[in-house]
Amino acid sequence: GAGVSQSPSNKVTEKGKDVELRCDPISGHTALYWYRQSLGQGLEFLIYFQGNSAPDKSGLPSDRFSAERTGGSVSTLTIQRTQQEDSAVYLCASSFGDRVLQPQHFGDGTRLSIL
Amino acid sequence: GESVGLHLPTLSVQEGDNSIINCAYSNSASDYFIWYKQESGKGPQFIIDIRSNMDKRQGQRVTVLLNKTVKHLSLQIAATQPGDSAVYFCAELSGGSYIPTFGRGTSLIVHP
């Protein structure tokens, strides 16, 4: 499809395990964002990638969280030693990063549940 | 009507009515605003945007109004349909920043 694709759509894992979440942005979009959304809450910014620039990691809640973006396209968000408070929907969005005043386009998210 | 409680503010309307969803933003330097619609189990979907040099912008069945004096943004939906039921939230972006600030959202419930 032409939209942002995220996988898996749902992930259930035990506390202490590591998880990897994947995002395929819209072709041609140079900017990629990861957000976290807890039930009934707004979007919490995690990390931002723009082209080949160093990512803005200012939103990552702890050093257990990391993200990579390979080849300027696909991105992976990794959470190590998961905790129950990590349970949330993780959303990825992309946009034309070279045009600041542009909307972000979101995937449907990965719903992460930590048992 | 609209109520605010422990959960998201909720607006309940009858099918065919016009809906108005409000958003107060915080940064007077914000110069770009976006409305998103989020249905259950889905990601946010772009509806309409407006730049700070405009007061009003219209789309298909939707209108966004911007009042910079009181830092207020509203989304008007004409002839609301059951398919419009969702959470709506606004986002603001200030010049030079690539990271928007998102509101918590308002839950719109449309009764057939």
Image (cartoon, grey):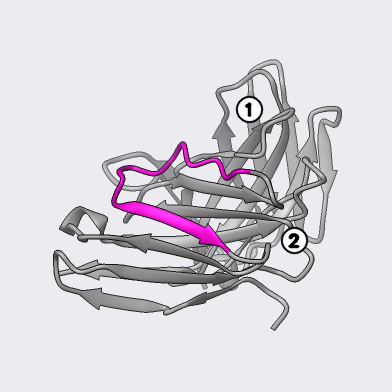
- Above or below: residue B66 compared with residue B37: above
In front: A58, or B5? A58
Q: How many marks?
A: 2
Q: Pointer 1: what residue?
A: B72
User: For residue A6: magenta?
Assistant: no
Q: CA distance from mark 2 to mark 1?
A: 30 Å
- In the rendered image, residue B2, in percent from the top left (x then y), is placed at 44, 43
Side of A98 where B72 appears, left or right: left
Side of A15 where B3 appears, left or right: right
* Residue at the image point whose x is 83% and y is 49% from the top: B58
- Above or below: residue A29 compared with residue B42: above
The residues colored magenta run A54-69
- In the rendered image, residue B99, in percent from the top left (x then y), is placed at 60, 39
User: For residue A67: magenta?
Assistant: yes
Magenta: main secondary structure equals loop
Residue occupying the far bottom of the picture: A1
